[in-house]
């Protein structure tokens, strides 16, 4: 029986392949420009070939995941204001299996509870116009958005003078939820919490 690669091994394999593609060691020579003259003047053929080669390899890894039931879940930890949360999320380069979706859906309540606790007194902003702008919202509006979504993800960005905590509230397939790739079956809303008087930067 042949060896089944683990989640962590697939993540490393994809990272190595991504690096090889970006270094020009892998090219999809059949990949061509978009056909749009305006876009094509900004896109170099080798860049398209590198990107296409990685996309093809990633699609093969996703198929391997599904065939061998290799989870896309990784466990992360976030610590904010002396509070710590360990939570499951789907690695950004893998896909979610049906049982992975069950796990992240079950974790939504604990992520939301943590978010509510650590963002008390912070200004909240909803990402709009595909992340190009932000609209200030109230905590009850976050609850309304959360009630319409299936799962949650959380991340934080900080330095000595700035703190931003981002709550992703999603539905459908996590791998299709960002950038409206799977809209309307999959998607997500992003809520940014920042200290009073600050604006989101991520």
Image: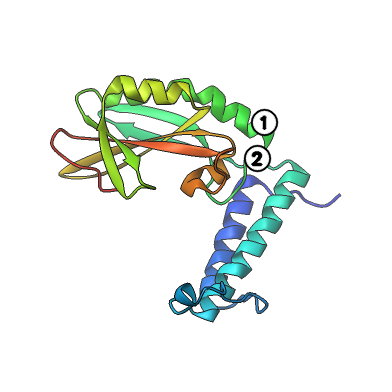
Residue neighbourhood size for the residue with mark 1, other residues' Cα within 10 Å, grouped as few (<14), some (14–19), many (≥20): few
Tell me the residue at 52%/73% (across/down). 36
- Colour scheme in use: rainbow
Q: Quadrant of residue 185?
A: top right
Q: Quadrant of residue 186?
A: top right
193 left or right of 8?
Answer: left
Query: Looking at the image, is 15 positioned above or below residue 46?
Result: above
Asked if marks 1 and 2 touch (Cβ < 8 Å), the reply is yes
Q: Please identify, in this view, whether the residue under mark 1 or under mark 2 is nearer the observer.
A: 1
Is residue 74 visible to the viewer in this orientation of the structure? Answer: no
25 left or right of 158?
Answer: right
Task: Give the x, y percent position of residue 119.
Answer: 27, 27
Residue indicated by mark 1: 99
Using the image as rendered, state which of residue 114 and residue 79 is in the foreground.
114
- Residue lying farthest left? 197
Q: Which mark is residue 71?
A: 2
Task: Give the x, y percent position of residue 128.
Answer: 34, 42
Task: Give the x, y percent position of residue 74.
Answer: 54, 40
Tell me the residue at 49%/79% (across/down). 44
Query: Looking at the image, is 112 positioned above or below residue 170?
Result: above
Name which of mark 1 and mark 2 comes first in the sequence.
Answer: 2
Task: Give the x, y percent position of residue 30.
Answer: 68, 77
77 left or right of 94?
Answer: left
């Amino acid at each position: 029986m042949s060896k089944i690669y683990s989640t962590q091994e697939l993540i490393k394999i994809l990272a190595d392949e991504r690096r090889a593609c970006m270094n020009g060691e892998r090219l999809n020579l059949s990949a061509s420009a978009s056909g749009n003259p305006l876009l094509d003047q900004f896109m170099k053929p080798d860049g398209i070939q590198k990107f296409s080669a990685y996309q093809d390899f990633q699609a093969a890894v996703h198929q391997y995941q599904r065939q061998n039931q290799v989870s896309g879940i990784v466990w992360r930890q976030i610590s904010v204001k002396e509070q710590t949360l360990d939570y499951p999320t789907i690695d950004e380069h893998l896909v979610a299996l049906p049982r992975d979706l069950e796990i992240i859906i079950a974790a939504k309540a604990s992520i939301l509870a943590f978010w509510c606790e650590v963002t008390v007194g912070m200004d909240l902003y909803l990402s709009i116009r595909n992340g190009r702008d932000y609209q200030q919202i109230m905590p009850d509006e976050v609850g309304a958005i959360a009630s319409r979504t299936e799962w949650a993800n959380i991340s934080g960005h900080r330095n000595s003078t700035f703190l931003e905590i981002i709550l992703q509230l999603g539905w459908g397939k996590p791998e299709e939820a960002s950038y409206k790739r799977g809209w309307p079956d999959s998607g997500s809303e992003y809520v940014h919490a920042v200290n009073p008087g600050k604006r989101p930067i991520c």
